[in-house]
């Protein structure tokens, strides 16, 4: 079985795939100080609840945008599951070209989304990920990664609004009844919800026009828009531009990447430092 670890800025998601289906998916808040032993106590308990043992895990793959969390996640795989994890990075075999100026700078999560989205939906397409950052990633018809857009995430914007404006409260995210708010909280909710809908629609329109011009496409061959991330269902309610919602896109990308690349060798020398990434 394959242990998949997706370590983001907000949550670390663990999942197990048995070769045909996901056996379980669990998440925990991202804490760079959390040790491998702390992860193990939590994760082994959850595995046991679905009838899985450490010996059932034969391979592991990690994708992370939090470099300081990587050491303990790798140690978790080595010490508790006796496997050296594959680390998602640009140098691996992705099965597509990374056609940007500095391939080593692109976040693994964005490449993983591109990999899974092209396999499931084919290109050309845009993947909108409503995560800690809101990202737009463009995939060509042949699956090549072409770059994208990075904007502040919804929760980051809410927190910044609360911190910077003394009289504005901390609010939850929701779709307001009207665009025009008649008190402070509805006005803030409208600004966030409809503001992000406007950003999505505006950026997708501009990306489509730029892509069509560079690729020589006629207007009817527009980009498919795939959304992922926890807030994707909410924001998809406000626009017709989002065609599909796929909450497991990054996990699927990690699974596909692990299947494409050789399993790393586990060293029995515990004094050997990890390879640099």
Image (cartoon, rainbow, N blue to C red):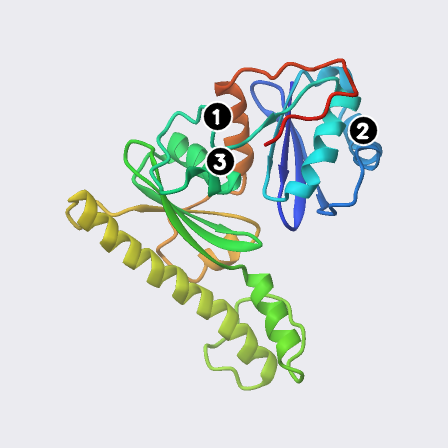
**Crowd class of label 2 (few under 14; some 14 to 19; many from 20; radius 10 Å):** some
- SS for callout 2: helix
**Mark 3 element type:** helix
Q: CA distance from mark 1 to mark 3?
A: 12 Å
Mark found first going from the N terminus, 2 or 1: 2
Report which residue position mark 1 lands on. Answer: 92
Q: Look at the numbered discs 2 and 1 and tell me whether their residues touch, using CB distance below 8 Å.
A: no
The tag earlier along the polypeptide, 1 or 3, is 1
Q: Report how many numbered discs are placed on residues in the image.
A: 3
Q: Are marks 2 and 3 in contact (CB under 8 Å)?
A: no
Where is mark 3, residue-wise?
A: 112
Residue at image point 56% right, 34% down: 251
Residue at image x 33%, y 34%?
Answer: 144
Tell me the SS state at disc 1: loop
Work out whether 133 lies above or below 189. above
CB contact under 8 Å: marks 1 and 3: no
Q: Earlier in the sequence, mark 2 or mark 3?
A: 2
Q: Residues within 10 Å of mark 1 (few under 14, many from 20)?
A: some
Pick the front one: 253 or 18 = 253
| In-front residue for pair 72/43 | 72
x and y, in percent, of residue 23 in the image: 66, 26
Residue 62 location, x and y as percent?
62, 31
Q: Is residue 161 above or below residue 80?
A: below
Q: Residue at x 36, y 29 (%)?
A: 96
237 or 32, which lies in front?
32
Residue 274: give x, y in percent of width and height.
68, 26
Residue 260 seen anywhere in this rendered image of the structure: yes
Q: Is residue 135 above or below residue 191?
A: above
Q: Quadrant of the C terminus?
A: top right
Residue designated by label 2: 44
* Relative side of 30 to 264, left or right: right
């Amino acid at each position: 079985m394959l242990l998949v670890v997706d370590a983001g800025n907000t949550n670390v998601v663990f999942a197990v795939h048995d070769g045909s289906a996901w056996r379980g998916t669990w998440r925990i808040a991202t804490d760079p100080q959390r040790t491998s032993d702390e992860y193990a106590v939590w994760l082994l308990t959850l595995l046991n609840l679905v009838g899985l043992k450490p010996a059932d895990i034969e391979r592991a793959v990690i994708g992370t945008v939090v470099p300081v969390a990587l050491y303990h996640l790798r140690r978790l795989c080595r010490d508790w599951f006796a496997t050296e994890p594959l680390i998602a990075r640009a140098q691996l075999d992705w099965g597509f070209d990374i056609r940007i100026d500095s391939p080593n700078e692109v976040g693994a999560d964005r490449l993983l989304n591109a990999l899974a989205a092209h396999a499931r939906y084919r290109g050309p397409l845009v993947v909108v990920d409503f995560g800690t950052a809101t990202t737009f990633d463009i995939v060509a018809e042949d699956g090549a990664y072409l770059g994208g857009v990075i904007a502040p995430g919804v929760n980051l914007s809410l927190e910044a609004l609360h911190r910077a404006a003394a009289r504005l409260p901390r609010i939850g995210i929701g779709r307001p009844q009207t665009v025009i708010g008649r008190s402070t909280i509805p006005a803030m909710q409208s600004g966030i919800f409809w503001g992000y809908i406007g950003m999505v629609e505006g950026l997708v329109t501009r990306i489509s026009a730029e892509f069509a011009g560079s690729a020589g496409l006629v207007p009817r061959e527009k980009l498919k828009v795939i959304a992922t991330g926890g807030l994707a269902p909410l924001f998809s309610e406000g626009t017709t531009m989002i065609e599909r919602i796929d909450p497991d896109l990054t996990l699927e990308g990690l699974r596909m990447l692990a299947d494409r690349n050789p399993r790393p060798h586990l060293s029995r020398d515990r004094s050997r430092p990890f390879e640099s990434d």
